[in-house]
Image (cartoon, rainbow, N blue to C red):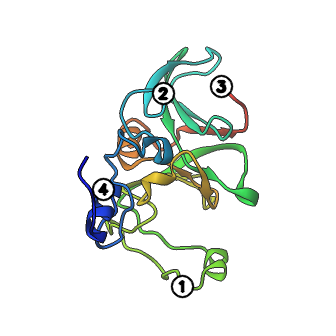
């Protein structure tokens, strides 16, 4: 085994970029860090996969299970595509039913006033397409709320309690979901377990 003696070598081995923009690349899905940062593969139980689902749910709706830390897109009666998600932390948790009211490619991120009170160093906004935009590359807006289903600039947070109320996906997963979901799609957010 090769000995790593420089700080750059250690950071490279850990997947940390020199600019500090990403601790683990979005494509990481194997190796010693997959248990810590989640599996970002298209298959396998930790990544995106197709699964059976209760037949009472009709196609073309989304079920978000905070308990499972999964988003289920119902594609046929009894069948769903399951995506791993980052979920709200602490008092930011909620549940209910909404509809997708808008879709956006490379959405701009504007922190709420409460986020800026909590962390005054936050920028007023981050332009869409910026590599450090917490909304990632796509967003599905939920009703008239501030909640979104969106991508991320921090893929290692998927599977964790980290958001201020939004549902966070890997960028490649939100691109996949975005292409299949229409404005008006029903989204049910619950604590119920499905798996």
Residue depth check, mark 3 versus mark 4: number of the one nearer the observer: 4
Which mark identifies residue 121? 1
Question: Which residue in the structure is indicated by mark 4?
Answer: 13
Residue depth check, mark 2 versus mark 4: number of the one nearer the observer: 4
Nearer the N terminus, badge 3 or badge 2?
Answer: 2
Residue that protrudes farthest toward the left in the picture: 2
Distance, label 3 to label 2, CA atoms, is: 14 Å
The part of the image, by quadrant, that contains residue 69 is top right
Question: Which residue in the structure is indicated by mark 2?
Answer: 45
Q: Secondary structure at mark 4?
A: helix
Residue 9, horizontal then vertical, whole percent: 26, 63
Which mark identifies residue 194? 3
Nearer the N terminus, badge 2 or badge 4?
Answer: 4
Residue 164 visible, this angle: yes
Q: Residue at x 25, y 46 (%)?
A: 1
Residue 174, horizontal then vertical, whole percent: 41, 45
Distance, label 4 to label 1, CA atoms, is: 30 Å
Q: In screen coordinates, is 74 left or right of 115?
A: left
Residue that protrudes farthest toward the right in the picture: 91
Q: Secondary structure at mark 3?
A: loop
Distance, label 2 to label 1, CA atoms, is: 37 Å
Q: In screen coordinates, is 165 left or right of 59?
A: right
């Amino acid at each position: 085994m090769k000995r790593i003696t420089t700080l750059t070598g250690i950071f490279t081995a850990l997947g940390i970029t020199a600019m500090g923009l990403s601790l683990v690349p979005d494509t990481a899905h194997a190796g010693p860090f997959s248990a810590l940062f989640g599996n970002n593969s298209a298959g396998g139980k930790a990544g995106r996969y197709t699964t059976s689902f209760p037949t009472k749910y009709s196609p073309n709706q989304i079920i978000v299970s905070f308990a499972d830390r999964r988003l289920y897109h119902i594609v046929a009666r009894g069948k769903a595509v399951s995506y791993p998600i980052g979920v709200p932390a602490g008092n930011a948790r909620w549940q209910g039913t909404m509809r997708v009211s808008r879709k956006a490619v490379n959405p701009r991120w504007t922190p709420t006033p409460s986020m800026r009170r909590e962390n005054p160093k936050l920028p007023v906004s981050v332009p869409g397409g910026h590599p450090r935009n917490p909304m990632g590359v796509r967003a599905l807006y939920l009703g008239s709320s501030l909640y979104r289903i969106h991508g991320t600039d921090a893929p290692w947070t998927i599977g964790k309690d980290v958001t201020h109320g939004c549902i966070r996906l890997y960028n490649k997963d939100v691109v996949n979901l975005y292409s299949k979901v229409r404005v008006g799609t029903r989204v049910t957010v619950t604590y119920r377990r499905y798996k």
